[in-house]
Image (spheres, helix red, strand yellow):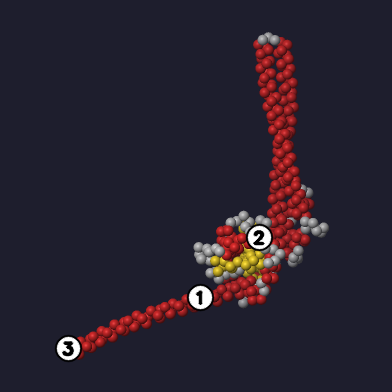
């Protein structure tokens, strides 16, 4: 699915839970779409695409935000909990920790919407669970 | 596919890890060879070409196999026909004809033997080519997977740079989870306050009305009782 087409369709879409989506395309070397869920206090989801997959990312925190003394404990907790988080996994891009979900490029519209919603719900749980490892 | 090419492919994740650790932004250049040409992409193209060649060769070989099998069937049919002629000649006690037809059968059996060997050889080649083809398909899929890993890593690095360049200042808070969480909690707290206030307002709104009605009823009763008392 083309990200521009997805953005148009998503902007008009309303989930059964009443969520709607604000989409914004970000100019740059690669195609990136920023999606925010209206009606859900969450995080912006950034969507990008390669030849075979669509990747949805939420940026969690950077290295500088981690309390250094509990960094290892935090990393272990991330490894321990990663498999339990539905449809999402942790990763680190540069010095930023992210929560992401990857889908096949052949995935349909509904799957992508499901990913965006689930990712946002997961991110909220993750940050709440990990906030003790982060500076104020 | 040479052993070196295979190793290049097999070590792609290690190369990505090494590149990320050295904080190189130019991932593709780091993973590709020094001549600037994509070694992995070249290997992918080579595997793709090999696959195409193997498919053509297999198609040709399968055609030959079918032709050879048809010739084999024709020879077998001819043998049956000439064996019948031998039998006829024998029943007619035509010795010369019997020998003649028997000779033809012998020649045909010899041809059959040769043709069977040829068919067997072609079939073996077909099987070999089919295995080669499957091997090439496997290599190609593996290269596609490795290329995808490489491109995804590069894409995500570039996307992150793009996002960071586009979101600065106050918006940067969007990318800090703790700040976002505090913002969300603050919002939810406000919502909760708002909800509580609305509830109280509703409650307050309702209570005076009920009290007022009760009071009115009570005062009416008082008035009636007072007048009744007066008149009695």
Callout 2 crowding tier (Cα within 10 Å): few <14, some 14–19, many ≥20? many
Q: Residue B191 shows which numbered tag?
A: 1
Quadrant the N terminus of chain A occupies: bottom right
The verdict on a common chain for dots 3 and 2 is no
Name the subunit of mark 3. B
User: Mark 2 — residue?
Assistant: A49
* Residue at x-position 40% and y-position 81%: B204
* Up/down of B73 relative to B161, above or below: above
* Up/down of B42 relative to B164, above or below: above
Name the subunit of mark 2. A
Callout 3 crowding tier (Cα within 10 Å): few <14, some 14–19, many ≥20? few
Q: CA distance from mark 1 to mark 3?
A: 61 Å
Callout 1 crowding tier (Cα within 10 Å): few <14, some 14–19, many ≥20? few
The verdict on a common chain for dots 2 and 1 is no
Instruction: Give yes or no for contact between labels 1 and 3 (Cβ–Cβ under 8 Å).
Output: no
Is residue A17 visible in the rendered image? The answer is yes
Quadrant the C terminus of chain A occupies: bottom right
Residue B164 image position (x, y, % from top left)? 68, 70
* Residue at x-position 58% and y-position 63%: A10
* Up/down of A43 relative to B224, above or below: above
Residue B118 image position (x, y, % from top left)? 74, 30
Q: CA distance from mark 2 to mark 1?
A: 36 Å
The verdict on a common chain for dots 1 and 3 is yes
Of residue B177 and residue B210, the one placed in the foreground of this image is B210
* Secondary element type, mark 2: strand
User: Mark 3 — residue?
Assistant: B232
Of residue A47 and residue B2, the one placed in the foreground of this image is A47
Residue A92 image position (x, y, % from top left)? 67, 66
* Residue at x-position 25% and y-position 84%: B221
């Amino acid at each position: 699915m083309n990200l521009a087409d997805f953005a148009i369709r998503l902007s008009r879409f309303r989930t059964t839970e009443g969520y709607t989506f604000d989409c914004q395309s970000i100019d740059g070397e690669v195609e990136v779409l920023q999606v925010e869920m209206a009606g859900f206090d969450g995080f912006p989801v950034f969507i990008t695409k390669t030849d075979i997959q669509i990747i949805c990312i939420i940026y969690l925190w950077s290295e500088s935000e981690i309390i250094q003394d509990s960094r290892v404990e935090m990393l272990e907790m991330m490894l321990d909990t990663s498999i339990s988080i539905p449809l999402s996994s942790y990763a680190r891009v540069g010095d930023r920790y992210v929560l992401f979900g990857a889908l096949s490029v052949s995935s349909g519209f509904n799957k992508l919407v499901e990913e965006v919603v689930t990712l946002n719900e997961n991110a909220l749980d993750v940050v709440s669970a990990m906030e003790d490892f982060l500076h104020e | 596919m040479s052993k070196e090419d295979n190793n290049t492919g097999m070590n792609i994740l290690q190369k990505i890890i090494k590149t990320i650790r050295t904080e190189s932004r130019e991932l593709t250049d780091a993973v590709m060879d020094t001549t600037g040409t994509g070694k992995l992409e070249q290997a992918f193209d080579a595997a793709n070409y090999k696959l195409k060649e193997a498919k053509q060769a297999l198609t040709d070989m399968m055609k030959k196999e079918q032709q050879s099998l048809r010739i084999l069937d024709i020879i077998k049919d001819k043998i049956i026909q000439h064996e019948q002629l031998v039998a006829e000649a024998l029943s007619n006690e035509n010795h010369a004809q019997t020998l003649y037809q028997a000779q033809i059968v012998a020649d045909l059996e010899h041809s059959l033997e040769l043709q069977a060997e040829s068919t067997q050889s072609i079939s073996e080649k077909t099987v070999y080519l089919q295995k080669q083809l499957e091997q090439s398909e496997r290599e190609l899929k593996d290269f596609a997977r490795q290329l995808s890993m490489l491109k995804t890593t590069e894409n995500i690095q570039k996307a992150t740079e793009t996002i960071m360049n586009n979101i600065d200042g106050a918006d940067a808070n969007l990318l800090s989870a703790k700040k976002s969480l505090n913002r969300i909690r603050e919002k939810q707290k406000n919502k909760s306050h708002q909800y509580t206030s609305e509830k109280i307002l509703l409650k307050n709104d309702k209570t005076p009305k009920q009290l007022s009605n009760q009071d009115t009823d009570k005062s009416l009763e008082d008035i009636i009782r007072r007048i009744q008392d007066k008149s009695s």
